[in-house]
Structures are given as structure tokens and as C-alpha cells.
Image: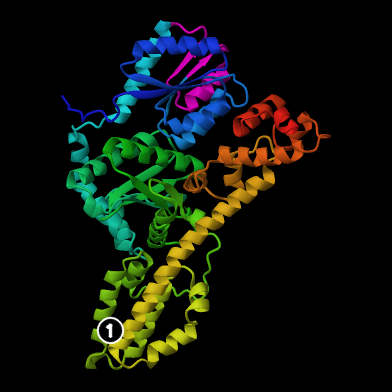
Amino acid sequence: MARKFDKIISMYKVIIVDDESVVRERLYNQLLYFSDDFEIVGQFENGYDALLSGTPLMPDLLITDIKMPYIDGIELIKRMKQELPLLQTIIISGFDSFDYAKQAISLGVIGYISKPITIDELSETIKKAKIALEKRNTVDENLEDLKKRADSGLKLMQNNDLSKLITLKDIPENFKEKLKTDEINLDYEYTILGAVDFDDEVTQISFNEMELVNFYLEKYFEEEFKDTNLDYIIFDNGEEFGLFMFSNEPIHKENLQEILVRILAKIKLGCHTSMSIGLSEFKHKDENKSYRELYRHALRTLEYRTVIGPNIVIFFDDINKNKTTTGKVDENEFKNITYEVLYGELDVAKERIEKLLKTITTENFKETYLFILNNLLDSLLKACVNLQALFLRYMTYEELSLKFHSIKVNEQLFDFINGLVDEIDRINKESRQSGVESSFRQILTFIDNNYAKSDLSLEDVASELNYSVSYISAILKKNNTSFTKYLTDVRMEQAKVLLRNPDNKLLTIATKVGYDDPYYFSHCFKKNTGISPAEYRKK
């Protein structure tokens, strides 16, 4: 019998949401029977309050009514799961509706309880919730099946094949045949590559943790992808895990993001390890893009963790806006130097450059010295994500080239190149920071300009700006806010302006700031400011 690790959470946190105080009280009393396993950390009378104040409580279980003022139960579940992807949910309702039940199933709801609630029905559903939470929060040590698959000869060959594949610009015919022999099918309409990486330095992660993550990544990918139209291959690429995802149908960015966010949440909860996933752009089979290029884009995307924060899923398309390509050189030589400078491994890059300079100043290289020097300069420029900034504030390309060729002493050339490497690293870091700040301003500006739309959603912002929901949520979280909070703040500030004019009726003000229901507006205003709109107007 398989042993289990100790439970990560000794008691599961519950919030109750229902607009009827009698129902909330009854539920509260009934849940006391399960107080050994569940702790009620919050009760709310509507979906808006639960979303704004309940989400920060980090509940494990949400028990909610469907028909409620302001935000209904279905919408509440959708929006809370954007922040809490592993949240378990139970729906209670006085309505026997197939449509509600269908939506509940699509959201992974554990139980659908009809009012009036009986202790027997609640008990049965709570048991299901406990089983689901225990499964989520424990890690089975009996990994024999996973180990057998991971250690199989076929899996090892596939791992080697894929690690090689992401280094090739062109795939030789004999290697294509080897991929087929090793059961690797790349013949799909759409492909996207990912890099799954530890947020901590690999040296800080024990072998047992690495092994555990290796096995459980396979397990969680299998769980999450089994009912989708996506195929995937995940492989160990040394310091990170590589990921191929395929489909013969268009891949929906938000659906993929939801799946991957859940996988990261499971890894963090089950393996005590924080990881992030960087994703390339989508590739259609007719596009002339190599897997090497896609994988490099996935790795480059991961660099934005230093700006946005860890434990995220981020797409190359999210961070590749407004990038300049002025003067970029697409050459393969000195790729190690380019890679190391681009990804901040400056000490390694400088050591490699120093060895290179010592080598090319020998007699054997006197005919090719200038040619190799040009390649070195081009490889460094290729590592800079914003050449325009480098040329404007440091040196133009002509000045850099002249400097490279005019220095006669090797030590002086090495010092100059070290300075160039440091400047490129500064620009790369600033560009990532400014790119995220630019995205943040775009998001706020869009909300500022569209707050009056009563149905404005996070998905609308993502669709309009062509960002993923996870990217927007991560940026807002980094700036200590959320979509709901910022939208409410903007609406309330505008409402205050309108309230100062006594000719503006409350109904008109509510409509102008995005509320079809004046009672919803009044509730939000009082929760935001501490007083009602009428009291504010009097002041």
C-alpha cells in the first residue's frame, strides 16, 4: 500500500456565499459537524463581496448560491478560479435548472445541492470535497508506474531526440526518420513550445525534489490534457523541462493558459516547488519557423519572471510587443556567447570571450582575426533586446565596429568588451521592466476608457490588448491590485465627480459609471468609500 506524505494543510478553509441570511446561518451550523477538517473563514451575502474580500482569504472550498445580487454564483466561480485555479466548489440553489447544472459541470463543481439543504445531502457532498482536497494536497510516494515510464528505453530516446531537435535550424531527413522510429509525431497543424523551469536556482533544489517534480509533471500533464484536443510531449532538457504541444485545431490561448496554471498550482501544492512556464508563439505547419527559434523564444519569455514575479504562465506574444529589430544579425556563430549574455550569465560569457580573444591573437588566426572579431561583435549585438537604446545612449554600430578594430592591445579590447556586455545586460533588464510597465499602462488606460461598459470583463481587456488573462492578472497583482478592484476604484472616483453635481440623479450616475442596477452601484460605493452615495453627496 502506498504511503503518503503528511498533509500540507491540516484544515481546509471554506467561504459561504448566499444572499439569504437564514441559509448562511443554516449552512454555518451544519458545517460545524465537519469542523475537524473544515474551517469557515468568511461569509458573504453577494458575489461581489465574495470576489473582492473572499479571494484574498485563499479558501480551499467555496460554497455558493447561484442566483445572487450583483455577481451570480457561476460568474463568481469563474472569476475566483482565475486567482485560485485549484479552488473546489459546491453550488446550492433553489432552482432546478439543467442549464445551471451544465455550467456547473463545465466548471468542475464537486456538488450541486438543491434547497432546502439537508444534512445528509451536505454530508455526502462535503465528503466528496474532502476526498478531492486530500487528493490535491497529498503526494503519493508509490511512483513505480511513473518511474517505469520515465526510465523506459523509449522515453530516454525521445528525451534525447527532443533535446537535440530544439537545437536544429533544419531537420535532416535521417533525423526525421529517427523521430518516427521513436514514436515522436510532429505532423500537426498547430504547435507551441514551452520551457518549464524552477523559480529557485537548481542548485537549491534537492535531487529528491527534482525527481518528484519530474514524475509529477508527467502525472499532472496527463490529468489535465486527457479530455482536450491537445497532444503534448514533455522532456527533461537539463536545467529546465521542454514542452511540445500540438493540435490539428486552432489552440485557444486562454484554455491552454488555464490548464497550465492548474498544473503549476498542483506542483507548488503537491511538490513544495514553485515553477513557471514560458511559451513561444503559435506556429502553423506552413510557417517557416524552426523549433530552435520557438524554444529560444520560450526561454526568453521566462526572463520576465524577474519583473512580473514567479509561478506564472507567460506567452511570448505578451512580451514581444513594441520590440525593435533594428540592425539585428541572424547568425548562428558564437551562439553560446549570445545565449549567455541574453540570459544574464555574464561571468560565463566573459570567461568564454576572454578565451576566444586569447585564441585569435595567435599566429594561426592572423588571416581571419578581423572576420572573427566581426562575428563576436554581431553575437553580442544579437544578445541585446533593444539595439536602438544601445546605439543611442552608448555607441552607434559604426562607432562600436571602429572601436573593435582600432584597439591593438588584447587586455584593452577585453576591458572594452566587458563594458559592452555590462551595458547590454543593463539595457536588457530595463527593456523587460519598461515592457511590463508599458503593458501595465495599456491595461489601466483601457479600463479607464471603458469603465462605463457594465459588462466589461478581464477577458475583454485580454482580447482587446492581445494579452493573456494570466499576464494581465500577474501585472495587476505585482502592482497590488486586481481587475475587479481597479475597475471599481475607477468607477467610484468618477461617481464622486458626478455626485458633486446635485442635478445628476443617482440612477443616471450609476449608468454612467457602468452599473445597470442602482442598488449594486450603491452597495459598491458604500463598500469602497464607507458611506452611501447620498451621504457622500450631503458632505
Q: Is residue 186 above or below residue 76?
A: below
With 447 as the anchor, is 261 left or right in this view?
left
- Who's the residue at 32% across and 29% down the image? 136
Q: Nearer the viewer, residue 281 or 17?
A: 17
Q: Residue furthest left?
A: 1
Residue marked by disc 1:
357
| Residue numbers of the magenta segment | 91-118
Q: Is residue 191 magenta?
A: no
Percent coordinates x, y for residue 138 in the rendering: 26, 30
Q: Position of residue 79 (x, y in %)?
A: 52, 33
Q: Amino acid at mark 1?
A: Leu
Image position of 504 (left or right of 190): right
What x and y, as percent, mark residue 37? 32, 19
Q: Nearer the viewer, residue 105 or 415?
A: 415
Say which residue appears at 19% left-offset and 35% top-offset: 143
Quarter that holds the N terminus: top left
Total labels drawn: 1
Q: Is residue 389 left or right of residue 504?
A: left
- Measuring from the top left, give residue 80's x and y in whole percent: 49, 32
